[in-house]
Image (cartoon, grey):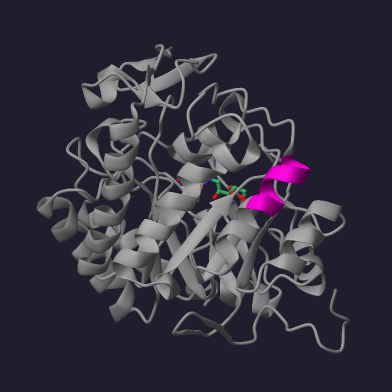
Amino acid sequence: MTNAATTPGLFETARLGSLDLPNRLVMAPMTRNRAGADGVPRPLMATYYAQRASAGLIIAEAATPNAVGQTYPNIPAVHAPEHVAGWRDVTDAVHAAGGRMFLQLQHGGRVGHPDNSGLTPVAPSPVPLPGTVHTADGPKPAVVPREMSAEEIRSTVADFAAAARNAIEAGFEGVEVHSANGYLLHQFLSGHTNRRTDGYGGSVAGRIRFTVEVVRAVAAAIGPERVGLRISPGGTANAMREDDIEDLYPALVDALADSGPAYLHVVHADPGQPLFRRIRASWPGTLIANPALPWPGPLPADGGRSEGERLLAAGADLVALGRAFLANPDLVERLRAGAPLNPVRDAYLMYTGEETGYTDYPVLADAALAAS
Ligand SMILES: Cc1cc2nc3c(=O)[nH]c(=O)nc-3n(C[C@H](O)[C@H](O)[C@H](O)COP(=O)(O)O)c2cc1C
């Protein structure tokens, strides 16, 4: 716990790995389904991210490291040369606008559908997602995933490392490994979705092994200072259940602390939670905290700023906000000026493919022009 005199403000600079950040506001990764059907990022995505380049750091939306890991339609991928070329246009636009950008790597595991990937989803165990998965024809019941073999686990670790190299080739400053929100890595962490009896299941040490191997492989591929890890202890997205977060997450953090990833990114971060404080105390690197705000909404009028400041006071280094950045391209300027925020429109307008609800949110300068 730091005190008010030593707590940095949201608008103070920070260091992340070898990057200098102009402020401590991070744009959280948000899937927006604007890529082509082949996973290639479209020019509209370059516009969207460049509009938000004043964030201290952008973490770009979940991108798929291999074909079977695809979750939903129009998700960007990062496992083929055409994906790299598409992302290059996005990172060029963000850099030209003065920004910095990591890419989130996400394998969906059981959160996927043959209609989306053309393949049967794979998972630690054949435990289906209870519910539906969005497809191009709307939501469809999830299928029973195929249990990954030991060989598939090894090749998937290698796919993450290759995807990370692709991301660097595409111009990203680094990657975030997604071990949160009920996707493949998180499925390995929970005893409800991981029923394996080999070395990748059972005990806490077994269930954290896949995430640890992915992070280490990615760090070895591109350098630990370019790698972050996202976790959501106790998070229930995608029907997740976890019984032993007080044991599992400290073990995961301890296992990774000495391999030196640049950051740990905690979803639903609560400064009063003992587990949050324990993670902060044992994590030597940068801690990004994504505050627990009302979900599905509405957002507080300040977009999460005061919750973010509470997290900084509790030892977080950076604060990630999602929906406030989605609706406010100039969020940093608005928060600095104490200006009102645009509300989020229409359930995020995912799956539309177009500008509406994506690149058409106004900035303060538009309002000033309209008033003059
Ligand atoms: C439209 C949308 C898409 C999202 N996609 C992702 C994603 O791709 N990866 C991820 O880790 N979290 C994703 N999230 C969760 C956000 O990163 C963030 O944790 C969540 O919105 C809570 O932060 P907020 O209250 O500031 O919005 C998504 C959230 C939204 C609203």
Instruction: Compare residues 306 and 159 and report the one nearer the observer.
Output: 159
Residue 326 placement (x, y as % from top left)? 51, 54
- Asked if residue 248 is among those painted magenta in the image, a careful observer would answer yes
**Does the magenta-highlighted stretch encompass residue 62?**
no
Rendered residue at 27%/31% (across/down): 68
Q: Is residue 304 above or below residue 347?
A: below
Determine if residue 178 is in view: yes
User: At which x and y percent is residue 123?
Assistant: 42, 26
**Residue drawn 22% across the image and 42% down it:** 39
- Tell me the magenta residue range: 245-251
Report x, y in % for residue 211: 48, 47
- Seen in the picture, residue 278 relative to 124 is either above or below; the reply is below
Vertically, is 306 above or below 80? Answer: below
Residue 2 falls left or right of residue 345: right
**Which secondary structure dominates the residues rendered in magenta?**
helix
Quadrant in which residue 111 is drawn: top left
For the point 28% across and 80% down, which residue is it? Answer: 96
Q: Residue at x 64, y 39 (%)?
A: 204
Residue closer to the observer: 274 or 202? 202
Q: How many marks?
A: 0
Q: Is residue 65 left or right of residue 191?
A: left
Q: Position of residue 154 (x, y in %)?
A: 31, 41
Quadrant of residue 253 in the image? bottom right
Task: Please state, as top left, top right, bottom left or bottom right, where the N terminus lies in the image.
Answer: bottom right
Residue toward you, 65 or 170:
65
Q: Is residue 181 above or below residue 316?
A: above
Residue 181 in view (yes/no): no
Horizontal placement of 333 versus 352: left or right?
A: right
